[in-house]
Amino acid sequence: MNKSPSLRAYAIAYLIFLYAPIALLPLFAFNDSKVIAFPLQGFTTNWFAEMWADQQLFNAFGNSLTIAVSASILSTTLGIFAARASTRYTFPGKAGILGLIMLPMVLPEMIVSMALLVVLMAIGVPLSLFTIILGHVLICTPFAVAILTSAFQSLDRSLEEAAYDLGETPASTFRLIILPLVMPGIISSLLICFTISLDEFIISYFLGGNQTVLSVYIFGQFRFPAKVPAVMALGFVLVCLSICLLTIAEYFRRRGIARSGGKDTGGFL
Amino acid sequence: MTFSSDKPNMIEFRDVHKYYGDYHALRGINATIKAGEFFSLLGPSGCGKTTLLRTIAGFEDISSGAVLIDSKVMDGVPANQRPTNMVFQSYAIFPHLSVEQNVGFGLRRDPRSAADKAKAVAEALEMVGLKGYGKRAAHALSGGQRQRVALARALILKPKVLLLDEPLSALDKKMREQMQMELIKLQRQVGITFILVTHDQEEALVMSDRIAVMFEGQIAQLADPETLYRRPNSRKVADFIGTMNFLPAQILSEGSSCEIEAQGFGRMTIGADQVMGATSGEGMSIGCRPETLTILFDGQTATDRESMATVEEVVYYGDMTYYDVKLDGAQTAMRLSMRNVPGRPVLDIGTRARVGWSPGAMVLFR
């Protein structure tokens, strides 16, 4: 096949634009200089040590973890209900209800967070980690529903009927047949929601009150040039964590496909 | 091919109706299936045969009427408490379990010891010809093997009734014919009532003790294969089962036997049992199967009657040759099948031929 050289150049430029900034993170995370600039000054792990010693950072990281774990579990649970309902049952207004569930996916987060803030203030709920979790569940649930709906949809209905026919109750059928078969979808959903929540800035900033999460903390640190290399180190750690999470998600997705004997139709990696 | 009718009733449908919204899927089903019978529900897609099967399994509620299994009304009895097991069209093999876990799935609530259950699983696998396959992953099996696993999984619970929803439709022709024979043998061996849903009339004829032919939510005819084939009770059933030729006919006189006149055949006398449905003098049609017509070669004489005809089409099938012949005086050609015998020529199109036939093989339809 005759490939156009300009298309090839475009593809390469595109990839550089996407990934070069991320590649800079490890470079400056190990660079022995407070200034983020070339040329590189030499190798150091001081920034990791500085990061490690930062109590506020740990606090923010702990908050982020609490939020991300709660939000991903809550939205995945809600997603299971919604996906099950949308794939198995018909009820009046189904399309409209599902549309409303999916809407926050395309709604600007700014609007969601402003609206939530106004409502929470009006009914007098104090801003805390809990309010951030609420906001994150709102934006994560559509993703959970999307992922889980496809998992539930690929489930042959007669599998359920077969288990039922062989003497199981609806509850034990769910536990023995449906849950194991949609487990890859559940794990993907948990991981995606976790990542979305961990990354999220606007809602966390608006609804956090005096509680700081990681994304907000990192943004704040950029005001102090001396802190930037430590933030780079933190960024590098986060990149490594993300790659681990994605790999795990992909592993479960592929294992799910292999188990059910399906055909791989592309995934994250 | 006859089935003794002194066996007890296993399934009874009493005026079963089923509506999906406005759609009337089952329109007053009345039928009885005997214990130990191999029974088929045959019909085109959308005729309600699968729905009817699912009312036995408990997967579909009925709108009115009653379904009885072993003389007990099944109203309100959920699928997991009915003495039936099902082989699904897609087989519904649990993909995350091994073959033996699949087969032993229904024994989970069985109080027997693990060793006894393992023995039962091994026996079930042996019965369906999958001895030694127990440890395999279910998703690594071929279509035919899945079919066998599904059978073993259903039969291990020793149900009173085994329901089979188009179990052979996903298999290729050779495999299907092999499985048909195996299913017949298996049914005789275990003695369980089998109810098969199929759209394949040949499959139904080959396997069943009795067949219910369904159209549009109703049973059009319920009979043993031979009766269904030789004496279909309507043109529709005749058309659905095998091939049947039709020619216009009229009744001249009625009684214990009927005097009729058919296009091409002329006058003949047939028994009252050969007249299907309400009669009227005019506008009837006579039907005959291709193999009841024969071409008479030189020196052969008709066992019954003969008419002159012209060969219009010849289709050679190896063991058989199909001819389309037009009887003198008939408007349309009829299909005729001849077994090919060494030394007998295959006729050319346009040949004049004597066609032998018999009034006893005719059926008169409204």
Image (cartoon, grey):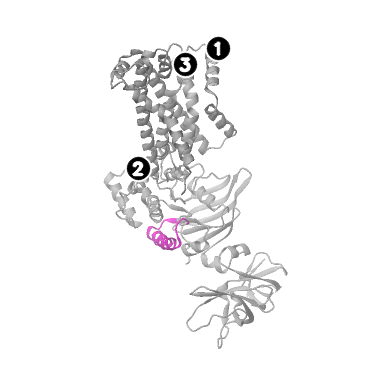
- Within 10 Å of the Cα at label 2, are there few (<14), some (14-19), or many (20+) other Cα atoms? some
- Secondary structure mostly taken by the magenta-highlighted segment of the chain: helix
Residue B359 location (% of width, % of height): 61, 76
Q: Measure the C-alpha gap from mark 1 to mark 3.
A: 18 Å
Find out whether residue B177 is within the magenta segment.
Answer: yes
Residue B12 in sight here: yes
A134 horizontally vs B284: left or right: left
Q: Say which element carries label 2.
A: loop
Q: Counting residues from the N terminus, which is met first, the one under dot 1 or under dot 3?
A: 1
Look at mark 3 in the image and give the residue it sits on. Answer: A205
Segment colored magenta: B169-193
Using the image, name the chain to which the residue with label 3 belongs.
A
Q: Are marks 2 and 1 on the same chain?
A: no
Task: Please name which of the two marks, 3 or 2, marks the residue nearer to the observer.
Answer: 3
Q: Say which element carries label 1.
A: helix
Look at mark 1 in the image and give the residue it sits on. Answer: A122
Query: Compared with residue A42, is residue A84 higher up or lower down, i.e. above or below?
Result: below
The amino acid at mark 2 is Arg
Residue B212 image-quadrant placement: bottom right
The amino acid at mark 3 is Tyr
Asked if disc 3 and disc 2 are in contact, CB closer than 8 Å, the reply is: no
Task: Please name which of the two marks, 1 or 3, marks the residue nearer to the observer.
Answer: 3
Residue A237 in sight here: no
- Within 10 Å of the Cα at label 1, are there few (<14), some (14-19), or many (20+) other Cα atoms? few
B41 horizontally vs B261: left or right: left
Find out whether residue B120 is within the magenta segment.
Answer: no
Task: Please name which of the two marks, 2 or 1, marks the residue nearer to the observer.
Answer: 1
Using the image, name the chain to which the residue with label 2 belongs.
B
Residue A171 location (% of width, % of height): 42, 36
The numbered disc on residue B108 is 2
Using the image, name the chain to which the residue with label 1 belongs.
A
Q: Say which element carries label 3.
A: helix
